[in-house]
Amino acid sequence: MKEEVAKVLEEIRPALQADGGDVELLEVTDEGIVKVRLKGACGCCPMSQMTLKMGIEKRLKEMVPSVKEVQSV
């Protein structure tokens, strides 16, 4: 599952980088929890939680059905 998640994050990454940010995949648990670190402008943006839940998490759940949640650490 980690490879599938990484592939989807690679598709999302250009949009984040266009705004000066990025996302780093840290862990994918057996329970379907994806742990990421938002970097650059995304790390300190007041809208980062919305980006995380409505952007990254939503897309990952669509493309990798076994993903249950995305957490920023």
Image (tube, grey):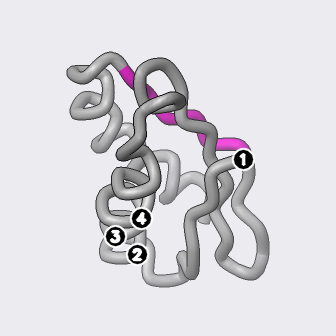
The amino acid marked with disc number 4 is Lys
Few, some or many C-alpha atoms within 10 Å of disc 4 (few <14, some 14-19, many ≥20)? Answer: some
Q: Earlier in the sequence, mark 1 or mark 3?
A: 3
Tell me where residue 69 sits by quadrant.
bottom right
Pointer 2 and pointer 3: residues touching (CB < 8 Å)? yes
As rendered, which of 2 and 37 lies closer to the eye?
A: 37
The amino acid marked with disc number 1 is Val
Tell me where residue 37 sits by quadrant.
top right
Q: Name the image quarter holding the N terminus.
A: bottom right
Q: Earlier in the sequence, mark 4 or mark 1?
A: 4
Q: CA distance from mark 3 to mark 4?
A: 6 Å
Q: Which residue is mark 4?
A: 53
Q: CA distance from mark 4 to mark 2?
A: 10 Å
The amino acid marked with disc number 2 is Lys
Q: Which of labels 1 and 2 is toward the front?
A: 1
Q: In this picture, which residue range is highlighted in magenta?
A: 21-26
Pointer 3 and pointer 4: residues touching (CB < 8 Å)? yes
Q: Which of labels 2 and 3 is toward the front?
A: 3
Q: Which residue is mark 1?
A: 73
Numbered disc 2: secondary structure: helix
Q: Which residue is mark 3?
A: 58
Q: Is residue 48 left or right of residue 31?
A: left
Q: Which residue is mark 2?
A: 61
Numbered disc 4: secondary structure: helix
Q: Earlier in the sequence, mark 1 or mark 2?
A: 2
Tell me where residue 16 sits by quadrant.
top left
- Residue name at image x 56 percent, y 64 percent: 70
As rendered, which of 7 and 25 lies closer to the eye?
A: 25
